[in-house]
Image: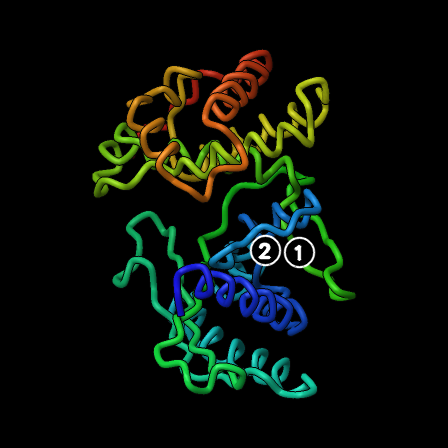
Amino acid sequence: MNRESREQWINAVLNEVFLAVIAWEPLRHALVFKGARILNLHLGESRQSLDIDSNLAAEWVASAPDVEAQAGFFEQQLPSALRRHFERQNPVRFRLGRVTVERQPPKGHRRGWDAFLLRIEIQDNRLAGVLGLPMLELDVAAPEELGPDAVETITVQGIPARVYALHRIAGEKLRAYLTSLPAYRQKMNSKEREFRVKDLHDLARILRARPAENAVFWAAAAREFQLACQSRLVDCQGLESFMENWPQARARYVTDLSLGKVAFDEAEQSLKTIVGLFAQQKIFPLEYPVA
């Protein structure tokens, strides 16, 4: 299986995993979905996504605060959801293999930002002779501060799913980019990370769909950006924070062939436009000392 075929397979099977999870009531109440898959749904696009991103629902964590119990919940509920979904297909194409629940970080987060990586092994009856099919991943992040309209319910193939609203996704993508920069990595004593230039690409896509003239949308996005930064102690002085090591970001962006739908110059201008809109809301500077 070459890289293109591998990625197409991952995307297709993750679509089935997503449907299985939102159709299983216990998981539907525990998780709020976000990321590229949900962005595609908001924008009416069908671009590939190679994982599923989610957050634990704050109200669910309040009812089940013990992290080991949370891990046990996913170990029990995720296989049940997947088996039911796969067994209902006619003909049955997929069979469930191993499901592992990994705590992130393994010994717990000192600030309580405990997360999970759910790794799923799927066997495909159409690829019976193919060895080493890739493991699939469902990321589950700790709850965050959210505005009153940050979560909404959308219907996917007749199944309700709780997802981040588009303005929340915009705010979170800006925050996520900042967390990959050296200033934040040093502040939190974390190891270096590749710059999240795909977030710049996605922000340009959002700006295409919600132009700068949509003042209500971008005011809401600014509020969610502020809450997202507060949740993870991310500082931001305005555009200068995003411009940290900008030549490196450019180099990373232009060499990533998956970002060809948006030229770097458009992504750069989109970022400047959005941060300028936020500056009009007078939200900068954002500063959250490490206690």
Figure quadrant of residue 85 = bottom right
List x then y, in percent, for residue 280. Answer: 59, 11
Residue topped by disc 2: 32
In the image, taking residue 183 as reference, residue 60 lies left or right, namely right
Which residue is the extreme one toward the front? 2
Q: Amino acid at mark 1?
A: Arg
Q: Quadrant of the C terminus?
A: top left
Picture quadrant where residue 12 is located: bottom right
User: Which residue is at a point 53% across and 78% down the rendered structure image?
Assistant: 77
Q: Is residue 52 above or below residue 25?
A: above
Q: Is residue 183 left or right of residue 86?
A: left
Q: Is residue 202 above or below residue 236?
A: below
Residue at x-position 59% and y-position 78%: 81
Mark seen at residue 162: 1
Secondary element at tag 1: strand
> In the image, residue 208 lies at what x, y percent?
65, 29
- Tell me the tag on residue 46: none
Query: Label 1 to label 2, Cα distance in Å?
Result: 5 Å
Amino acid type assigned to the residue bearing label 2 in the image: Val
At a point 27% along the width and 28% down the height, the residue shown is 183
Label 1 environment density (alpha carbons within 10 Å; few <14, some 14–19, many ≥20): many
Badge 2, how many Cα within 10 Å: few under 14, some, many 20+?
Answer: many
Q: Position of residue 212 (x, y in %)?
A: 66, 19
> Looking at the figure, which quarter contains the N terminus?
bottom left
Dividing the picture into quarters, in which one does residue 175 lie?
Answer: top left
Question: Which sits earlier in the primary sequence, circle 1 or circle 2?
Answer: 2
Q: Residues at badges 1 and 2 in contact (C-beta under 8 Å)?
A: yes
Closer to the camera in the image, 206 or 178: 206
Q: Is residue 23 left or right of residue 104?
A: right
